[in-house]
Image (tube, rainbow, N blue to C red):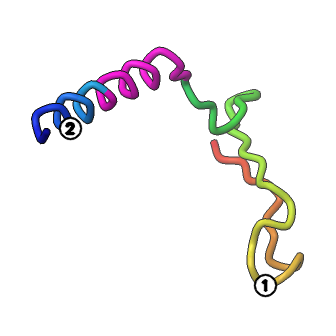
């Protein structure tokens, strides 16, 4: 009984790993323009209200 459980668990883990590897894409964290890297923040995702929301940021 334990042998079948272990085989099922290992087989499921391998299948899940293969699915993740097959569907993985690269992430883009910002946008480059004229040497600047722009990162846009989601509106309303911070704590403390709108006065603390950064909206976006640019670095060179």
Residue 2 image point, x, y percent:
12, 41
Alpha-carbon distance for marks 1 and 2?
49 Å
Residue farthest front in this picture: 1
- Does residue 35 belong to the magenta stretch? no
* Rendering quarter of residue 37: top right
**Residue at 53%, 19% in the rendered image:** 23
Q: Considering the numbered disc 2 on the image, is that residue within a helix, a strand or a loop?
A: helix
**Residue at 78%, 84% in the rendered image:** 48
Residue pointed to by mark 2: 5
Left or right, 22 with respect to 48, comes to left
Q: Quadrant of the N terminus?
A: top left
Q: Which is more N-terminal, label 2 or label 1? A: 2
Most common SS among magenta residues = helix
Q: Which residues are magenta?
A: 12-25
Q: Is residue 48 above or below residue 35?
A: below
Label 2 crowd (10 A; few <14 / some 14-19 / many >=20): few
- Does residue 15 belong to the magenta stretch? yes
Q: Closest to the observer: 13 or 59?
A: 13
Q: Considering the numbered disc 1 on the image, is that residue within a helix, a strand or a loop?
A: loop
**Residue at 10%, 34% in the rendered image:** 3
Residue 29 image point, x, y percent:
63, 38
Q: Closest to the observer: 24 or 17?
A: 17
- Residue 19 is tagged as none
**Residue at 86%, 60% in the rendered image:** 43
Residue 58 image point, x, y percent:
72, 48
Residue pointed to by mark 1: 48
Left or right, 54 with respect to 60, comes to right
């Amino acid at each position: 009984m334990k042998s079948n459980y272990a085989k099922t668990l290992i087989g499921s883990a391998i299948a899940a790993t293969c699915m993740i590897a097959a569907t993985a894409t690269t992430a883009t964290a910002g946008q480059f323009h004229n040497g600047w890297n722009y990162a846009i923040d989601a509106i309303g995702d911070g704590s403390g209200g709108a006065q603390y929301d950064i909206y976006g940021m640019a670095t060179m």
